[in-house]
Image (tube, rainbow, N blue to C red):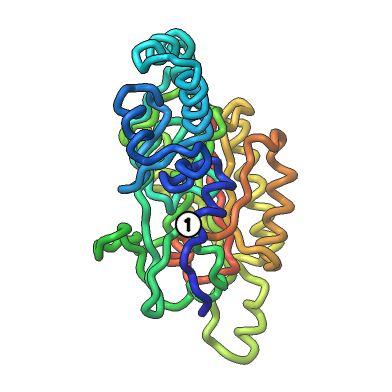
Amino acid sequence: MKDYKMDSKKYLDQTGVYKMVQVTKKVNLTPRAIRYYESEGLLGDVKRSIGYTRYYSDDDVSRLFEIKTLKNQGKKIAQIKALFIEKYSTQTDTLTHSITIEDAFIEESDVGKCQAMGIQIQPLSLKMNGITMDYLKWKSVDINTFLAPFDILVHGTNRQIQCSGSWLGNAKRSVINATLKQHHAQPLTDAWVANEVARCIEWVMMPVQVNASGVMATDLLNYVVLEKRIGQQIERHVMPLDGAMVLFEKQFKQMVVAANGRVMFVTVHRTKKQLLSDTMEASIRDLVANKNRLSIEDMGPIYLKTIGTTDAVLISALPGA
């Protein structure tokens, strides 16, 4: 296996989120000076704590450059603070999110947006073959590696994240997607997210797992399992792929009609270059009229842990309220 140590500088630069050591180099200030300006309220509320590490945004960096300029002009801290209160008082985000989201339910590209929106992130770790790595770096690992046993841990501890005995579903990801893409004007709380997740309709489609040999195994090669879940209600079918595709499309269209055509978000998780995954992806792209409300993402370890196959597709749809 390759070295999975996170290239944090490259990752953070791409997402517009910086550690203290990077900020000091960008603005040529000492950590002590930056912490002092922060304590004086000159960086406002734009910075957030992700796990146990302090991160700074592009807006923080801009403010630090502005502070340097004003100090070079002879301005005192009290004067700069008064200027900033007037300048930035109208730029405060009116939504206050009081939730911590495990990073298993976000993508690397979401980190900066979560930070800007005040959403706290609980970092997780993956432990496999004696190697521990940051969860969000899972794409650097061959996907088939996750078919062997592995653990998902709370970062920096030995506490394991317990996955359910059945397929996890990706409803929570749809709710988070809808929020991050600003299709919700609603502060995130644990209770509200749980309520939205309960409204989601989820599907999983995967090949039938056959241990038999001979004619029986051959006859079942093109059979799939299609499960639809709303809350605690599960509808399950085992049928040929063509029939399952027709049934899924019918169920999806019924969901759209029942929601008066308003679908807040659809999230798909699948593995690329798999026959079933490619077939389902093409169908879903045709079914979702507003592509801004659709996100097609790679199948992550937390989903593979409960499904057990790379050739499966998870779909969740959040109907309009």
Binning the other alpha carbons within 10 Å of mark 1 as few (below 14), some (14 to 19) or many (20 upward) gives many
Which one is nearer the viewer's eye here, 266 or 118?
A: 118
The residue lying at 37 percent from left, 44 percent from top is 50
Kindly tell me whether residue 175 is visible in this rendering.
no
Q: Specify the quadrant of the image occupied by residue 99.
A: top left
Which one is nearer the viewer's eye here, 239 or 35?
A: 35
The residue lying at 72 percent from left, 35 percent from top is 289
**What residue does disc 1 label?**
136
Residue 174 location (% of width, % of height): 51, 42
Say what secondary structure mark 1 lies in: helix
Which amino acid, mark 1?
Leu
Residue 170 location (% of width, % of height): 48, 50
Residue 19 vertical placement versus 305 (above, below): above
Q: Is residue 62 left or right of residue 293?
A: left
The residue lying at 34 percent from left, 22 percent from top is 41
Residue 91 location (% of width, % of height): 48, 16
Residue 285 vertical placement versus 135 (above, below): above
Residue 159 location (% of width, % of height): 25, 62
Kindly tell me whether residue 98 is visible in this rendering.
yes
Q: Is residue 239 left or right of residue 230?
A: right
The single residue placed furthest to the bottom in the displayed view is 214
The residue lying at 62 percent from left, 31 percent from top is 257
Residue 8 vertical placement versus 249 (above, below): below
Total marks shown come to 1
